[in-house]
Amino acid sequence: MNKKILISLSVIGAIAAIVIGGTIAYFSDTETSTGNIFTAGKLDLQVDSTCKYNGVSQAFCTWTLKDLTSEKFFDFSDVKPGDSGEDTISLHVYNNDAWGCVTITPTANDDISSNEPELAASDIQNDPNNLWDGELAQNMQFMIWADVCNQGGVPGDNIYQAGCDRLLTQGTGPLAPVTWALADSVTPNVFTGTIGPLIGSNNYYIGVAWNIPTTVGNEIQSDSYSADVSFYTEQHRNNPNFRCGSARVVTVTDTWSVVDTDGLYGESQNLGDSQQHFEWFAKNRINNSGFEMAIGTDDAAPAG
C-alpha cells in the first residue's frame, strides 16, 4: 500500500512539474542586424586641361580628366617677345569635400648659353654650373584666376573677365616656391568667396595666362624657365583647422638670421635676441607634417 502511494505521488509530482514548467513565460523579442561593414570613403583629385599658344590649341597640354603622371601644362621651346598662352585647368575632387592648395615650385631659371646679341644686351656670360643665372622668369608676365564668371561667359571659358572672375595672383614668374590656398580654414574659397571646402564631385576651373612683353629684348635669348605645379587636397570632414602654407609676422624670443649654404635657399641660424621676425609655416605635401621657422632679416625670403 505504501509503495503504491509513493509511486502515485511520484507520478503526480512529475506531471505537476511538467504542467508548471509548461506554463512559465516572459515577454521577449529578438532583432538581428546582419552584415555590418565599415567602408572607407574616397578622396581622389583628378585634373583636365585645355591650353592655347598664341591663340592656337595645343594637343600636348590638352587632356581629359585623369590622375597626372607626366603631363605638362606648359612646354614651349621657342618663345619670343610678343608670345602668349593660356591654360584652363579643371579640378575635380571625388567624392568627398576637401580643402585644397596649389604650389608652384621653380626648378630652374637658366641661361643655357650666351650668344653675341645676348652679351651685347649687357647680359653676363652664362655659368654652366648655375641653374639660376637666367632672365626669362623676370621678364614673363603671369596671371592666375578662378574662372567662375557666368555673366557674359561661362566658367572655364578660357577668358579672364575682370570684376567677375576671381584673380588669384599676377606678376613675373616666381623664383622661389609659393603656395596659394584654393580653400582652407582661414582663407576664403577662391571659387565661392567664402570660407569653405571644395565640394565633392563638382567642377572647379583655374585659368593661367602668360605672355612675354614686346618690350623685352635680347637678354632672354636661350634662357629656360621651368617649374613644377602641384595641387594638394585633404579631407574636410573632422579636419576644421587645415591651412595651406602661410607666412605671418610674429614675435619670437630668439634672433634668427638667414644663411645660405647651398646657393639655392636660405637656412636659419639662431643668434639669440628677442625681436620681431617673419615666421614661415609650410605643410609637407607627402606626409602632411608641419614645421615652423623664424627668419630675421626684413628682405629674407621664407626658407625652403
Image (cartoon, rainbow, N blue to C red):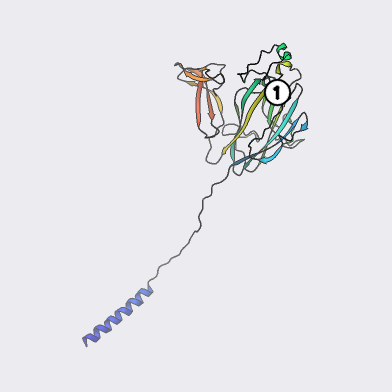
How many numbered discs sit on the rendered protein?
Answer: 1
- Residue sitting at x 33%, y 80%: 15
Residue 9, how many percent across, how many down?
A: 27, 82
Task: Tell me the quarter of the image containing the N terminus.
Answer: bottom left
Image x and y of residue 106, in percent = 62, 25
Judging from the image, what secondary structure is the residue with disc 1 in?
Answer: strand
Vertical position of residue 26 compared to residue 200: above or below: below
- At label 1, which amino acid type do we have? Gln
Q: Nearer the viewer, residue 167 or 89?
A: 89
Give the left or right position of residue 295, taking residue 194 as reference.
left
Horizontal and vertical percent position of residue 200 = 62, 42
Residue 13 coordinates in the image, percent (x, y)? 29, 79
Q: Quadrant of the C terminus?
A: top right
**What crowding class fits label 1: few (fewer than 14 Cα within 10 Å), some (14-19), or many (20 or more)?**
some
Report whether 77 appears left or right of 34: right
Q: Residue farthest to the bottom?
A: 1
Q: Is residue 63 above or below residue 269?
A: below
- Give the residue number, with chain letter if any, for mark 1: 141
Task: Kindly tell me whether residue 172 is visible in this rendering.
Answer: no
Residue lying at the far left in this picture: please name it: 2
Q: Is residue 200 left or right of residue 215?
A: left
Where 184 falls versus 170 (above or below)? below
From where the camera sits, is residue 89 visible?
yes
Q: Which corner quadrant of the image does residue 184 belong to?
A: top right
Q: In terms of depth relative to the viewer, which is nearer, 219 or 237?
A: 219
